[in-house]
Structures are given as C-alpha cells and as structure tokens.
Image: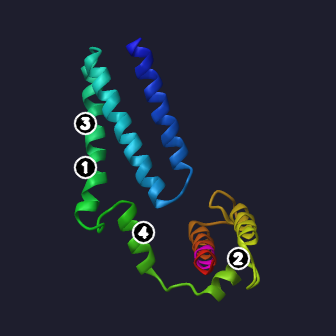
C-alpha cells in the first residue's frame, strides 16, 4: 500500500512538473523547479528507506542541490541565475519596445483587442518557432515581448 502511494505521489509530481513546464512564464519556471525538487527529495527518501541507498542518496542530494539553486537567488535579491535574475536582465539588456513597434511586429492595428493580439501572436509563433526552418530564439523573444507589452497595455487601460 505504501509503495502504491509513493508511486502515485511521484506520478502526480511529474504531471505537475510537465504542466508547469508548458506554461513558459517565470512563475511557472519557478514552480517547476519547486515541484521537481520536491519529487527528487521524496524519491531519494523513499528509495533510501526501501533499502536502495545507492540510488536514494544521490537522488536526494540532487533535490537538495535544486533547493539551494531555487532559494539562493531570492536571498541575493534576484541577481543570480534563475527566473528572477533572467527577468531583470532581459528587460535591461536591450532597448525598450514601444507600442507602435509592438503593433508592427505583430502586424496588427492600433484598435486591436485581446483576441486579435493572441491570434497574431499564435500565427507568428507557428511560423517563427526555433524548431522551424524560418525561426530563431531571438525572433520568438521579440514576438513574445510585443505580445506581452500590448496585452499589458490593454489590461491597464481596462
């Protein structure tokens, strides 16, 4: 019974990690790291208690190392690696995009609503995704930045 519960808990953590990983936001990245860290710690403890310390100890240590990487950036004010450091450095790295530039990138008019912005974003992401021949990571970042800027401006106006 305990082994079945452990198996179910591990599968639930993996499913949660998979779901968070598909969200593509900094909060989701942080949540994914927490879920995977918890899963590694639980798996390490369960394996060690079940008589397989050769596997349990390294997996548990991996979970502890992930915990250190998650907690450390917050204690340094978000300046290190991790979602907070990436977010602040990405905003400060290049020139700021204006609303007119964002509209031009997505190819939409000034009066576009949220559904038009999302439709234009999805169409460009299908075309410019790094896995396709035409796309690159830089182009997708530019499209994402344009979409985020326009949606934020739209929500602030409401």
Residue annotated with mark 4: 87
Q: Is residue 45 magenta?
A: no
Q: Earlier in the sequence, mark 1 or mark 3?
A: 3
- As helix, strand or loop, the secondary structure at mark 3 comes to helix
Residue 127 quadrant: bottom right
- As helix, strand or loop, the secondary structure at mark 2 comes to helix
Q: Which quadrant: the C terminus?
A: bottom right
Foreground mark, 4 or 3, reads 4
Give the total of numbered labels. 4
- As helix, strand or loop, the secondary structure at mark 1 comes to helix
Q: Earlier in the sequence, mark 2 or mark 4?
A: 4
Q: Earlier in the sequence, mark 4 or mark 3?
A: 3
Residue 139 quadrant: bottom right
Dot 2, crowdedness within 10 Å: few (<14), some or many (≥20)?
A: many
Q: Which quadrant: the N terminus?
A: top left
Residue annotated with mark 3: 61
Q: Which mark is residue 68?
A: 1
- Which residue is at 48% across, 35% downward? 14
The residue nearer to you, when weighing 150 against 63, is: 150
Dot 3, crowdedness within 10 Å: few (<14), some or many (≥20)?
A: some
The residue nearer to you, when weighing 126 against 74, is: 74
Give left or right: position of 67 versus 98: left
Residue annotated with mark 2: 106
How far is disc 1 from disc 3 in space, using C-alphas? 11 Å
- Up-down relation of residue 68 to residue 105 (above or below): above
- Which residue is at 37% across, 65% downward? 84
How far is disc 2 from disc 1 in space, using C-alphas? 39 Å
Range shown magenta? 149-153
In the rendered view, how is the structure colored? rainbow
- Up-down relation of residue 5 to residue 94 (above or below): above
Q: Position of residue 92 (x, y in %)?
A: 41, 80
- Which residue is at 25% across, 49% downward? 68
């Amino acid at each position: 019974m305990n082994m079945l519960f452990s198996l179910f808990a591990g599968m639930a953590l993996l499913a949660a990690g998979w779901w968070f990983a598909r969200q593509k936001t900094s909060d989701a990245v942080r949540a994914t790291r927490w879920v995977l860290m918890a899963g590694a710690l639980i798996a390490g403890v369960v394996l060690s208690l079940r008589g397989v310390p050769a596997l349990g100890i390294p997996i548990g240590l991996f979970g502890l190392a992930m915990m250190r990487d998650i907690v450390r950036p917050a204690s340094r004010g978000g300046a290190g690696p991790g979602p907070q450091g990436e977010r602040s450095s990405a905003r400060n790295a290049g020139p700021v995009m204006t609303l007119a530039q964002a509209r031009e990138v997505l190819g939409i008019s000034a009066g576009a609503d949220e559904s038009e912005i999302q439709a234009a974003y999805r169409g460009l992401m299908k075309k410019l995704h790094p896995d396709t021949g035409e796309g690159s990571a830089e182009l997708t970042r530019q499209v994402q930045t344009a979409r985020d800027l326009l949606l934020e401006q739209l929500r602030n106006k409401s």
